[in-house]
Image (spheres, helix red, strand yellow):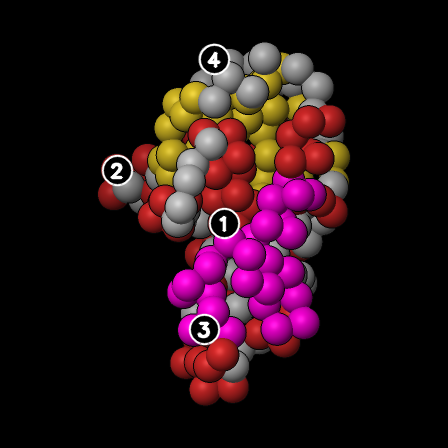
Amino acid sequence: MKELWLLRHGETPWNAEGRFQGHYDVGLSPEGLRQAYRLAERLAAYRHSFDGLYSSDLQRAALTARPIAEALGLTPIYDRRIREIYAGELQGLLRSESELRYPEFHRAVQLDPWNTKRPGGESMADLAARVQEFLDELPEGRHLVVTHGGVIRAALKLVLHLDNGSWRRFHIQNTSITRLLYPEGTALSVGDVGHLEAWAEGLADEAVLS
């Protein structure tokens, strides 16, 4: 059995601005760094042992994985297959800008969100193909996977065998935890951000600021 703890990266400046990121290598914002330390502290508090720590090679994921690796004594394994969807010519644009420049894409993606390619980029189906390969090659055990919102939605569709556009309804916040059993097809939690709730506001701030 494979138990996947899918962790979205911390906030980036482009997340805060609402820009498409794709494969553009944006780092974490100060808030994103705080989120990463809070996530690491929460994971360290679990009594679970983890067999592996995998991360997208984009720096927003790698920087999120760093405090997790330190807290748990794990060495991250970087894998390009769990990068965010390649957004092509949309990268760097605000949604409002992309709607003006690529109205045909926005009409098409509303009709077929799974198979419509970003201009010069990938479709969700393309992304899912590399995520499926990653899932199949992952060894048995309990693994942490630091990745991106699109990857987590694709994994939810693949693991839970979701149809139509239901995979789009999940709200995957920065540093949220989504736990899946594969290939059993079970979700243990989706989009859990308990470490970011009000009671957690003071967690790890000293470590971040030091």
The nearer-to-camera label among 2 and 4 is: 4
Q: Secondary structure at mark 1?
A: helix
- Residue to which mark 2 is pinned: 199
Disc 1 residue type?
Gly
Is residue 187 among what the camera can see? yes
User: What span is colored magenta in the figure?
Assistant: 105-131
* Disc number for residue 106: 3
Q: Give the vertical position of 18 relative to 157 (above or below).
A: below
Distance from disc 1 to disc 2, alpha carbons, whole Å, reads 25 Å
Is residue 62 among what the camera can see? no
Distance from disc 1 to disc 3, alpha carbons, whole Å, reads 19 Å
- Label 3 neighbour load within 10 Å: few <14, some 14-19, many 20+: some
Distance from disc 2 to disc 4, alpha carbons, whole Å, reads 21 Å
The nearer-to-camera label among 2 and 3 is: 3
Disc 2 residue type?
Trp
Q: Secondary structure at mark 3?
A: helix
- Residue to which mark 1 is pinned: 149
Q: Mark 1 or mark 3: which comes first in sequence? A: 3
Q: Secondary structure at mark 2?
A: helix
- Residue to which mark 4 is pinned: 47
- Label 2 neighbour load within 10 Å: few <14, some 14-19, many 20+: few
Q: Mark 1 or mark 2: which comes first in sequence? A: 1
Location of residue 193 (image quadrant):
top left
Q: Residue at x 39, y 49 (%)?
A: 165
Along the line of sight, which residue is nearer the eye, 207 or 191? 191
Distance from disc 2 to disc 3, alpha carbons, whole Å, reads 39 Å
Image quarter where the N terminus lies is: top right
